[in-house]
Image (tube, helix red, strand yellow):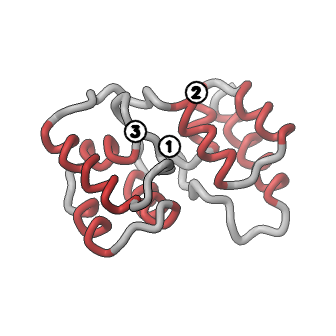
Amino acid sequence: LAPFWQLNLKTFMQVNSLDERSSQALQELSKMQALQVMGLVGRENSFVIRGVRNPSAAVMQRLAKAQAGVGGLEPYQQLPRILEDFIEVNSIDERGAEVLRSLPNEAILHVMGITADNAFVISGVRNTSAALMARIANAQRRYP
């Protein structure tokens, strides 16, 4: 389950612009609790925090719930929401989004860097669409 969770945790902190206190608290969590706060397990959270003025405070609330065992531990219950976060964060065009949505769950997780050594944020490339399509091709070879 989420073998690259520590990379995902760093990306989560960056994407949500978390302050030092909440970032430190996240790094002290167990793997399952961190995955729950990031929305990768359980049914309550999403990867991108929306609709709050202070994402760091929202993370601290999520953290308290995770430590209390609230929200469940089922893997990838929020996958559709996480996929939409990925599409938004990376400004994926409609064609790329359609292809992503048509993939099996295992391939989606691979493309997003949850189960592969990719970053959630596609950066350092000239052409995001081409980088996405390369990730998709790689995932389709792994998960036909």
Locate residue 95 relative to residue 115 in the image: left or right.
Answer: right
Residue type marked 3: Asn
Q: Secondary structure at mark 3?
A: loop
Q: Where, quadrant-wise, is the C terminus in this rendering?
A: top right
Residue tagged 3: 45
Residue tagged 1: 115
Residue type marked 2: Asn
* Percent of width and height locating residue 87: 68, 45
Whole-Å distance between the Cαs marked 1 and 3? 19 Å
Q: Earlier in the sequence, mark 3 or mark 2?
A: 3
Q: Measuring 15% from the left and 44% from the top, which residue is drawn there?
A: 67
Q: Earlier in the sequence, mark 1 or mark 2?
A: 2
Whole-Å distance between the Cαs marked 1 and 2? 11 Å
The disc placed on residue 132 is none
Q: Secondary structure at mark 2?
A: helix
Q: Measuring 50% from the left and 45% from the top, which residue is drawn there?
A: 114
Specify the quadrant of the image occupied by residue 136.
top right
Is residue 23 shown above or below 144? below
